[in-house]
Image (spheres, rainbow, N blue to C red):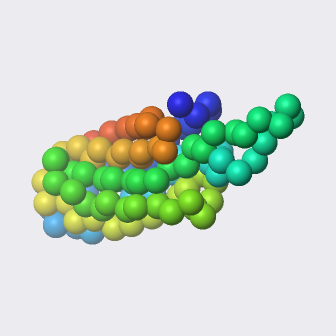
Amino acid sequence: MAEGVKPRVKVPKSASAGEVITIKTLISHKMESGQRKDGDGNPIARSIINRFVADFNGQNVIDVTLEPAISTNPYFQFEATVPESGEFTFTWYDDDGSVYETTKSIEVS
């Protein structure tokens, strides 16, 4: 598991039924390509976020496969329509097998 990984997400606290909202996500992750070596000449293990998924009440909203050229601290901004109150689940998958997850609720009136 990579050190210092911190997912951050901004979802409005409330919206109207059927409203299109903007969601912003950022995960603090150093991203290691596996090509560099440490001070002793040993290879540093590859650790790259390779997939990002966002679900709303169990339904997939976005599913992105990331390639090795992805930058450090990947940021995503996307829109979603919210038909009802519920919970967004955001999941990032790392090459090293680590999974980082966070949730945010939204109230629809």
Q: Residue at x 60, y 51 (%)?
A: 73
Residue at the outermost right position:
39
Q: Using the image as rendered, state which of residue 46 and residue 91 is in the foreground.
A: 46
Give x and y (percent) for residue 78: 39, 66
Query: Is residue 104 in sight in this rendering?
Result: no
Give x and y (percent) for residue 41: 83, 37
Total of numbered circles in the picture? 0
Give x and y (percent) for residue 84: 13, 54
Q: Is residue 34 left or right of residue 100?
A: right
Q: Using the image as rendered, state which of residue 45 and residue 26 is in the foreground.
A: 45
Quarter containing the C terminus:
bottom left
Quarter of the figure with residue 89: top left
Query: Is residue 53 in sight in this rendering?
Result: yes
Q: Residue at x 38, y 62 (%)?
A: 64
Q: Using the image as rendered, state which of residue 91 and residue 50 is in the foreground.
A: 50
Q: Residue at x 25, y 60 (%)?
A: 61
**Looking at the image, residue 81 lies above or below residue 6:** below
Give x and y (percent) for residue 94: 47, 43
